[in-house]
Amino acid sequence: MTQAINSTQALYRCLPAMDSLLLIPQVIRFTDQQGKPWIKSLLAQMLKDARQQIAKSRSLPSWCLNQTKIVTELERRLVLALRQSMTPVFNLTGTILHTNLGRSQMCEAAIDAVTKVMRHPVPLEFDMGQGKRGHRDSAISALIHELTGAQSCCIVNNNAAAVLLMLAATSAGKEVIVSRGELVEIGGAFRIPDIMAQAGCKLVEVGCTNRTHLKDYAAAITDNTAAIMKVHTSNYHISGFTKVTEEAELAALCQERGIALISDLGSGALTDLSRFGLSKEPMPQQMLSDGVNLVSFSGDKLLGGPQAGLVVGDSELIAKLQAHPLKRALRCDKMTLAALEATLMQYRNPESLDSLLPIFKKLSRPQPELEQLAEQLLIVCTEFLSHFNVTIKASQTQVGSGSQPDVLLDSVSLCFSQKPDSQLSLQQLDSHFKTAQIPIIGRITANQLWLDLRGSDNDEQLAQVLVQIAANIAAQCSGVSQ
Ligand SMILES: *Cc1c(COP(=O)(O)O)cnc(C)c1O
């Protein structure tokens, strides 16, 4: 016992003192570059970890052995700490618009526009003609009018905010009628009944989960009804014996009874998606021509732009939204507005969307091209073969973010499965993928790790990263067996 304590104390004594660490020439160079307080805190953490290791396993970490190893360990920690949390990854999950991976990627024009407004003063709320105060949504409003025929629009932080503002500004203190089949929950905390309550509206449910008729809506209208709201059931699909009341029918009813018809569209595709083999997603312009007064949708779902919520429609109602105190709290910054404007401009030429917007580029990529890519990557993957079987499998990609819940696009995946005698598990492989220089995010199902290639942005880079991961695994395994 005493001997054990003595030997532990001897180990503690082997730890270098902070002052001596700070005198190592390479460490001095780091402190010059990064500032002394931060480098000192990294060194303090190294010493703390070392003390913990001594207490736990009576051993010294190998970096304590000499100055070179100390510097290498410090450098390793520095590189990790300097890596930003939002580092680019390959999204090979099989879900193109992945909310946890930042939804839509932006077109080059949007990236360019954002860079400019970050760097320079811009007339965000400045009327260049008159030299007086302008409105931050007016440029987008003009574009939206051009593209959808909407009289006006209001831009906020996301579609959840758009629905909140739309309800608060048109219907606070009053009743809003919604079909029981459309009381949607979107991932997270967005539930229609909760948003209604937050907006100060009284939710009036009508119809049944599977069927709601025009007469159900008509019977629920009272003197205190402000609006009927339609909600796009974007993340589920009710089939079988069903009946939804279409917007055009509801518009006539609302007009007759003097109430508003508002719609939460969710995805809001501005272009027909049937050319990708996707079913027709309802489009805002269609809703407006059917007589809906206000339509809200996301900027970063099928629109392919930045996170934003757009409410488009009648100018009188939009003016109410613009004047509501919540608008000031929910408004977008110049970077979002610049990215949104640049994205919307691409829609002037629908033919070019497939090559310019990353979302459409991925959705429209021909299957044979993905098959060819898979063959090429399989050759690169030979290095993995000592531990894993790697095969090419047909798979299916989903659009994601509640867009087109039951539509899947054909795709091709690389599939990794563990060999019976391998010392590496699928989880370990996954963690090698996730800690690569450009992390690869795949999906583990049925004891296989799937990399869905429709998500690739850069095939050559993907190949390089796979080669690098294979090398890391080889190095790790040779280390283990020595
Ligand atoms: C996605 C979605 C929302 C939420 O939109 P965010 O942009 O994520 O805030 C609201 N309603 C519907 C129907 C949706 O599909």
Image (cartoon, helix red, strand yellow):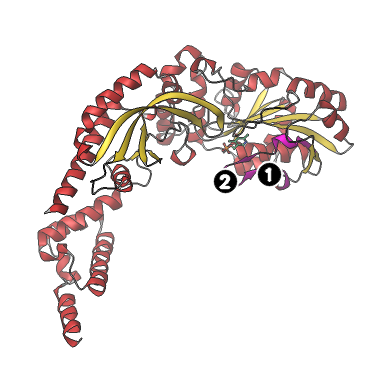
Q: Is residue 119 above or below residue 60?
A: above
- The residue labelled by disc 2 is 188
Q: Quadrant of the C terminus?
A: bottom left
Q: Residues within 10 Å of mark 2 (few under 14, many from 20)?
A: few
Using the rendered image of the protein, determine whether residue 129 is visible from the camera's viewpoint: yes
On screen, residue 100 versus residue 184, left or right, reads left
- Mark 2 or mark 1, which has the lower sequence index? 2
Estimate the x, y position of residue 283 in percent, counting from the top left. Answer: 62, 21
Badge number at residue 31:
none
Q: Quadrant of the N terminus?
A: bottom left
Mark 2 C-beta closer than 8 Å to ligand 1: yes
Dividing the picture into quadrants, the one containing residue 474 is top left
**What amino acid type should be assigned to the residue bearing mark 2?**
Gly
- The residue labelled by disc 1 is 195
Magenta extent: 176-197
- The image quadrant where one finds ligand 1 is top right
Is residue 16 located in the magenta-colored stretch of the structure? no
Using the rendered image of the protein, determine whether residue 349 is visible from the camera's viewpoint: no
On screen, residue 85 versus residue 212, left or right, reads left
Q: Residues within 10 Å of mark 1 (few under 14, many from 20)?
A: many
